[in-house]
Amino acid sequence: MEWAARLEDLCKEYRLGGGVVRALNGITLAVRSGEYVAIMGPSGSGKSTLLNILGCLDRPTSGRYTLGDEEVSRLGDSRLAEIRSAHIGFVFQTFNLVPDLTLLENVELPLYYRGHVSARQRRRCRQLVELVGLGHRMHHRPPQLSGGQQQRAAIARSLANDPIFLLADEPTGNLDSTNSLEILELLATLNSAGKTLIVVTHDPEVAARAQRVVRIRDGVVSSDGPVLAALRVHE
């Protein structure tokens, strides 16, 4: 079995004033390649801290994090930046597109961070724009796109480096119900094609699209199971 990400007894502590706050307290979690996992939890549960560690934006205080075949828990900032660029696709609720670049240029942007962009890579970016249904908007800029179209562009951008997994943080948080449904259907299509998805959300309707729901409370995993059973318990 191939694993996209594995966390073993992961802890994260922050120093606040004269004390120590433990945001994560022994998280053990594994995500299989091709799996669709929703991570849920109330405000202050440790969900955001977990997201930052999964995205290699932060390091744990103790424990292990293995991304693909590489143990990344103790790597330095420069190596973590390389891993983020090469292996993780990010989708945020605020889209984070560059307004002065075209849609296609935004999709190509992660490749420029890694150096030269080849003709083959440019063709792939065009194909990704087509994949998310925006071929007719390829040369428009973000202010000319609707919220749903901007999120589709952000998803295409997240796929540019063919990442190990997509990490989506409240991907429908700024969208109306129609656009939210379209984005959720697009994510489901990507997962059906084999892409691993980890979606952090507070919305049961978003979590219901996943195969599995992991709930975080007070820095620990409070439940982990198939989506229907997990959501039924917490109705």
Image (tube, rainbow, N blue to C red):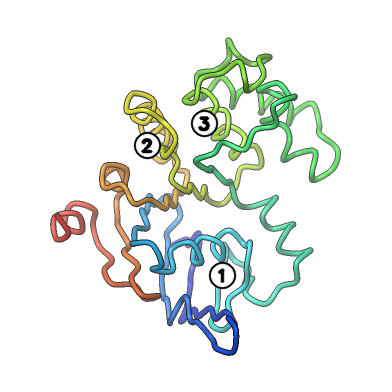
Q: Considering the numbered disc 2 on the image, is that residue within a helix, a strand or a loop?
A: helix
Residue 83 % position (x, y):
69, 58
Kind of residue indicated by mark 3: Gln
Along the line of sight, which residue is nearer the eye, 42 or 189?
A: 42
Q: Is residue 58 above or below residue 201?
A: below
Label 3, label 2: how far apart the Cα atoms are: 15 Å
- Which comes before the other along the chain, label 3 or label 2? 3
Residue 157 % position (x, y):
62, 35
Residue 122 circle label: none
Which residue was labeled with disc 2? 188
- Rendering quarter of residue 95: top right
Residue 9 % position (x, y):
46, 82
Which residue was labeled with disc 3? 151
Label 1, label 3: how far apart the Cα atoms are: 29 Å
Label 2, label 1: how far apart the Cα atoms are: 25 Å
Around disc 1, counting alpha carbons within 10 Å, would you say few (fewer than 14), some (14 to 19), or many (20 or more)? some
- Which comes before the other along the chain, label 2 or label 1? 1
Q: Measuring 73% from the left and 31% from the top, which residue is drawn there?
A: 121
- Which comes before the other along the chain, label 1 or label 3? 1
Which residue was labeled with disc 1? 66
Q: Considering the numbered disc 3 on the image, is that residue within a helix, a strand or a loop?
A: helix
Kind of residue indicated by mark 1: Thr
